[in-house]
Image: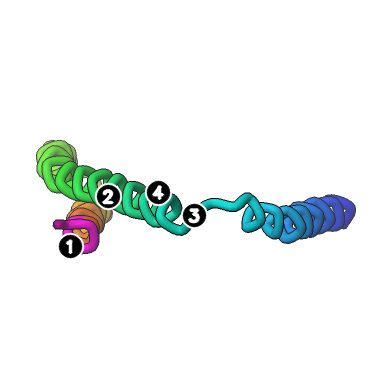
Amino acid sequence: MKIVKTTYYQTLSLLLGLALSSGSLYAQGLKSGAIAKGVDKATTELQDVGKSVGDLMLPLCLIMGFVGGISCASKFFNNDPDFKKSVINWGSAIIFAGVVGLVLTAAFGK
């Protein structure tokens, strides 16, 4: 209970500090052109990183497929009772990585 209270008070003090300091950020006298350029640059960098990670996920699925196939084949030929579980685990991991790669490519693609 003491840990929860300590975490609660730390989080509350952090949020209060951020709320109080955010007013001084707007009072710095930055021109809107500088802010717009910064936002555009950040958006471009985020799109580049997202596209790169999305493109990297598809070859990762290929590698996962080879490793999973070898692992599942080994279990099949050794008559391991966990063969079906292994196939389901590897298959769902490959599908999840592929969907994440496609979503990232679609969301951040140019």
Question: What amino acid does circle 1 point to?
Answer: Ala
Q: In the rendered image, is residue 70 in sight?
A: yes
| Marker disc for residue 44 | 2
Q: Using the image, determine if residue 78 lies above or below residue 95.
A: above
Q: CA distance from mark 2 to mark 4?
A: 10 Å
Residue 21 as seen in the image, left or right of residue 26: right
Q: In the rendered image, is residue 87 in sight?
A: no
**Where does residue 70 sit, x and y in percent of width and height?**
12, 37
Instruction: Classify mark 1: helix, strand or loop.
Output: helix
Question: Are circles 3 and 2 on residues that touch, CB within 8 Å?
Answer: no
Question: What amino acid does circle 4 point to?
Answer: Gly
Q: CA distance from mark 1 to mark 2?
A: 15 Å
**Where does residue 33 sit, x and y in percent of width and height?**
40, 55
User: Counting other residues with Cα less than 10 Å from the Cα at mark 2, is it few (<14), some (14-19), or many (20 or more)?
Assistant: some
Q: For the stretch drawn in magenta, what is the main secondary structure? A: helix
| Marker disc for residue 31 | 3
Instruction: Classify mark 3: helix, strand or loop.
Output: loop
Task: Please tell me whether mark 4 or mark 1 is closer to you in this view.
Answer: 4
The residue singled out by tag 4 in the image is 38
The residue singled out by tag 1 in the image is 106
Quadrant housing the C terminus: bottom left
